[in-house]
């Protein structure tokens, strides 16, 4: 009897190779833990890519273990029209894959079959032949752009590819000629930030009468692997009076001020002693002093300290809401804000202006004025069990100082009383914690807006097979049927409960990609009819609760009416759908294309405004998308919304593993607040590094600190990271089966250094997937205690050629610098480093302890 495994199956029969098959991601093949194949997919689509029908990457499949060497994958999607099986069978050193694919519609379709996403870094040190013809070098991967497909090919379509590398010989045979191209830097989501080669067939024709049969055979012949070994490394350890030397450079000012007349050469010393000529300034302690304490170790106030004159408050400045002005003289500080929001922003900005000069915290003299170009500046987040603590920190340390003032909180996954059977669903938030989260936002002057998907993307409602009687298609439960009175009753009850709990002034009903799944093939007119039924229901709900109505905008736009996200099918149908939306509704007009031309984002904003709606330019994480769309929003005087799509929960781990989505908020702040026109490369800072320092940064010393420099051999170079000075020696290398196969798998360093902090400079020879465990560091102390630090790829360390920001470490010249606090001063006597990744190849360049 077959055993069903939902998560995936891992096989380890013989030492030669392992393989796994997972629903969604498909095939994985590895040698001694080093990935060779990192995925496979099927995509059914309408010829010409006019429409996508079904993708195994976005929908689940049944994965069955048939016997010790065989896996059977079965799928049925797009209303049962796309069906098939994929059989995986291992036979010695071969993995045979057979595809049996079917299509049930009268009109034919095409299939893009990705037989394998091959790890380029695992095999690039070798050679490639295609149908017996030698290919170009596998290491070369410089191309003219992200979409230059033809230049990325390694050969004409072939049926037999042989990779001969130091790690393994890999031969791939296919039943018909297939395409192999270099996907490094390719402009597709699956390739972003990854070193992959794409192997497969781009356009297999399929029809009801002509199913597709396709075969792939992988032959894996690994090279011998050395036994793991350990090493005791002798290191150099020297005292240094300036391992920490405060950085006296003027701080970055983000977002860019409207008027900046600050003089950083003539500064006012911050003494912590104040005179209040007009009375103590409101929010001074919570916004300014607390903000300053996040950045610096503030010295105690001396009785002899010079008093600074401080005044501030709310004033009619003629600025946009949230604007402010700051005036600093050689003995006084004045902060005036446009209403309370402006005063808060001004005091937070004052804390960001501080810097160190001659061992003291100082503020530049002069004048600064800020008037945000865009008034409505929002961030979209999910909720979850840990959302409240995480989001309090996120907003306190990052988003409030950056000037955000709206929060769209996707909160359908809450333990709602009216849906008792869903209360045990994964990652749901309690009602009481959700209410407190909304109160937290209001206490900070931020408007919280609940988002509950109410038409389309309603998988949450059907989780665990619940509420299928409300679905348009119970076999593919994706959204509710507005023709069913029970659907309306459910939504009314749900929103009654949510509005009573949260008391919102605006509610977001979702409604994006409403017909993506579960509809018949010729569903465009049906979708428009159902849309016309659903919009009045949603409008009645918002009216009843005296709240403005917001929805996503893609279903109301047709190709040619926007740069992308045009799911309205045709201009006739999109106009019909827009006509059904109540006038005055707010439209979260989402477009995620990376385009450097702001004018290309104007048409949709103009169309929504022309027809009586209030659009909000909604972006994702691509820098050029944020810059261009936010600039277009400034032209059209609309709001902006920075979205995150990183799973259904909100916590620090999710942020770390999707760091580019959160660090993008720095760019969103810059371009929505200041409408700075500069291109991304001209900003002069790395948004990832800025976000990391705001969120994870610790108070820095204002005077030099002495400590120990620790490195191997002789110092090769000096590295400066903010206030940290490290001497880098000969790399201490750990094994990589790809590029350092003879290096040890663990090393031990005997050291003698006392301190409360350690910083380590490191990199890896090869890239890994975000979150992959690279190594464990164990710090051994003289009192017998120890401290362990796990190094994860993308969080703490990256490859020398990986320029993306890490969430926990700085990057300088390709070197990751991670600071590790010990909690209190301790005598360090040893450091053990154990490699966990067989492919990363961790290298330690130096450490400091202070």
Image (spheres, rainbow, N blue to C red):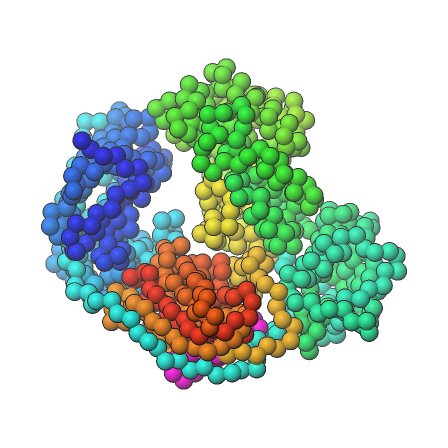
Q: Give x and y (percent) for residue 440.
A: 65, 42
Q: Kindly give the residue lying farthest to the right in the view shown.
A: 277
156 sits left or right of 648 in the view: left
From the viewer's perspective, is residue 725 above or below residue 839?
below
One can see residue 729 in this view: no
The image quadrant that residue 68 belongs to is top left
Q: Is residue 226 magenta?
A: no
Q: Residue at x 13, y 55 (%)?
A: 131
Direction front: furthest residue: 783
Give the side of residue 8 with respect to residue 825, left or right: left
- Classify residue 366 by image quadrant: bottom right
The reply to whether residue 363 is visible in this rendering is: yes
Q: What stretch is highlighted in magenta?
A: 709-725
Return the residue nearer the eye: 158 or 349: 349
Q: Residue at x 40, y 65 (%)?
A: 777
Residue 33 falls in image quadrant: bottom left
Position of residue 419 measured from the top left corner of the image (x, y, whole percent): 50, 25
* Residue at point 23%, 39% (across, down): 204
Q: Where is residue 258 in the image (x, y as percent from the top left)?
A: 70, 58
Q: In this view, does 489 lie above or below 636?
A: above
For this orientation, the residue located farthest to the top is: 485
Q: Is residue 712 magenta?
A: yes
Image quarter where the N terminus lies is: top left
Q: Position of residue 207 (x, y in %)?
A: 22, 30
Compared to residue 799, the image places residue 146 above or below, namely: above
């Amino acid at each position: 009897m077959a055993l069903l495994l939902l998560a995936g199956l891992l096989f380890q029969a013989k030492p030669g190779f392992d393989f796994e098959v997972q629903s969604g991601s498909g095939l994985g093949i590895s040698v001694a833990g080093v990935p060779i194949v990192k995925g496979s997919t099927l995509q059914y689509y309408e010829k010409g890519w006019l429409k996508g029908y079904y993708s195994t990457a976005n929908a689940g499949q049944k994965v069955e273990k048939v016997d010790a060497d065989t896996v059977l994958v079965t799928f049925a999607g797009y209303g049962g029209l796309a069906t098939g099986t994929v059989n995986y069978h291992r036979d010695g050193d071969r993995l045979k894959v057979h595809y049996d694919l079917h299509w049930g519609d009268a009109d034919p379709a095409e299939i893009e079959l990705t037989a394998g996403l091959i790890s380029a870094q695992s095999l690039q040190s070798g050679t490639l032949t295609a149908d017996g013809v030698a290919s170009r070098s596998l290491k070369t991967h410089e191309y003219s752009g992200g979409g230059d497909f033809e230049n990325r090919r390694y050969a004409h379509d072939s049926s037999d590819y042989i990779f001969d590398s130091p790690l393994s010989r890999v031969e791939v045979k296919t039943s018909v000629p297939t395409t192999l191209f270099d996907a490094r830097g390719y402009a597709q989501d699956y390739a972003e930030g990854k070193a992959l080669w794409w192997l497969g067939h781009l356009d297999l024709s399929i029809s009801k009468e002509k199913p597709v049969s396709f075969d792939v055979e992988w032959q894996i012949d690994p090279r011998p692997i050395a036994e793991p070994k350990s090493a005791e490394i002798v290191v150099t350890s020297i005292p240094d009076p300036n391992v920490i030397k405060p950085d006296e450079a003027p701080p970055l000012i983000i977002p860019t001020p409207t008027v900046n007349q600050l003089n950083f050469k003539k500064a006012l010393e911050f003494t912590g002693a104040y005179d209040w000529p007009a009375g103590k300034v409101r929010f001074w302690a919570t916004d300014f002093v607390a903000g300053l304490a996040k950045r610096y170790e503030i010295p105690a106030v001396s009785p002899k300290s010079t008093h600074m004159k401080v005044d501030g408050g709310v004033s009619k400045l003629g600025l946009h809401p949230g604007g402010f002005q700051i005036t600093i003289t050689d003995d006084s500080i004045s902060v005036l804000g446009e209403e309370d929001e402006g005063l808060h922003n001004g005091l937070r900005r004052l804390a960001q202006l501080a810097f160190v000069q001659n061992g003291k915290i100082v503020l530049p003299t002069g004048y600064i004025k800020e008037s945000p170009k865009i008034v409505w500046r929002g961030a979209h987040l999910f909720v979850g069990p840990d959302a409240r603590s995480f989001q309090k920190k996120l907003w306190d340390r990052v988003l409030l100082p950056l000037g955000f003032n709206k929060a769209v909180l996707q909160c359908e996954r809450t333990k709602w009383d009216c849906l008792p059977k869903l209360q045990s669903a994964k990652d749901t938030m309690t009602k009481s914690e959700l209410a407190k989260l909304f109160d937290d936002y209001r206490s900070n002057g931020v408007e919280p807006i609940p988002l509950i998907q109410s038409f389309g993307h309603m998988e949450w409602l059907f989780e665990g097979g619940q509420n299928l009687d409300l679905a348009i298609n119970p076999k593919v439960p994706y959204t509710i049927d507005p023709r069913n009175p029970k659907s309306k009753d459910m939504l009314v009850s749900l929103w009654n409960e949510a509005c009573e709990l949260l008391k919102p002034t605006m509610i977001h009903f979702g409604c994006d990609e409403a017909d993506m799944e579960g509809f018949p093939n010729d569903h465009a007119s049906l979708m428009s009819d159902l849309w016309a039924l659903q919009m009045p229901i949603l409008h009645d709900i918002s009216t009843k609760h005296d709240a403005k109505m917001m929805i996503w905008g893609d279903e109301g736009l047709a190709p040619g009416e926007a740069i992308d996200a045009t799911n309205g099918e045709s201009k006739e149908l999109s106009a019909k759908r827009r006509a059904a939306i109540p006038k005055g509704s707010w439209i979260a007009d989402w477009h995620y294309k990376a385009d450097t031309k702001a004018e290309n984002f104007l048409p949709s904003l103009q169309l929504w405004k022309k027809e009586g709606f209030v659009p909000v330019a909604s972006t994702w994480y691509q820098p050029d998308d944020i810059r261009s769309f936010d600039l277009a929003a400034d032209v059209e005087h609309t709001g902006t919304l920075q979205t995150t799509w990183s799973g259904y929960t909100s916590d620090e781990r999710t942020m770390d593993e999707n760091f580019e989505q959160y660090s993008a908020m720095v760019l969103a702040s810059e371009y929505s607040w200041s409408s700075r026109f500069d291109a991304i490369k001209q900003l002069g800072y790395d948004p990832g590094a800025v976000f990391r320092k705001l969120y994870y940064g610790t108070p820095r010393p204002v005077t030099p600190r002495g400590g120990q420099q620790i490195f191997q051999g002789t110092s090769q170079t000096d590295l400066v990271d903010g206030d940290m000075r490290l001497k880098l020696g000969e790399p201490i290398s750990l094994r990589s089966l790809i590029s350092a196969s003879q290096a040890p798998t663990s090393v031990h360093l005997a050291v003698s250094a006392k301190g409360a902090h350690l910083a380590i400079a490191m990199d890896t020879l090869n890239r890994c997937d975000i979150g992959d465990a690279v190594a464990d560091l164990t710090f051994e102390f003289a009192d017998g205690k120890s401290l362990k630090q796990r190094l994860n790829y993308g969080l703490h360390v990256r490859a020398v050629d990986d320029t993306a920001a890490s969430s926990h470490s700085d990057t300088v010249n390709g070197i990751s610098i991670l600071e590790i606090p010990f909690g209190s001063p301790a005598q360090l006597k040893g450091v053990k480093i154990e490699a966990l990744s067989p492919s990363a190849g961790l290298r330690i360049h130096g450490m400091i302890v202070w």
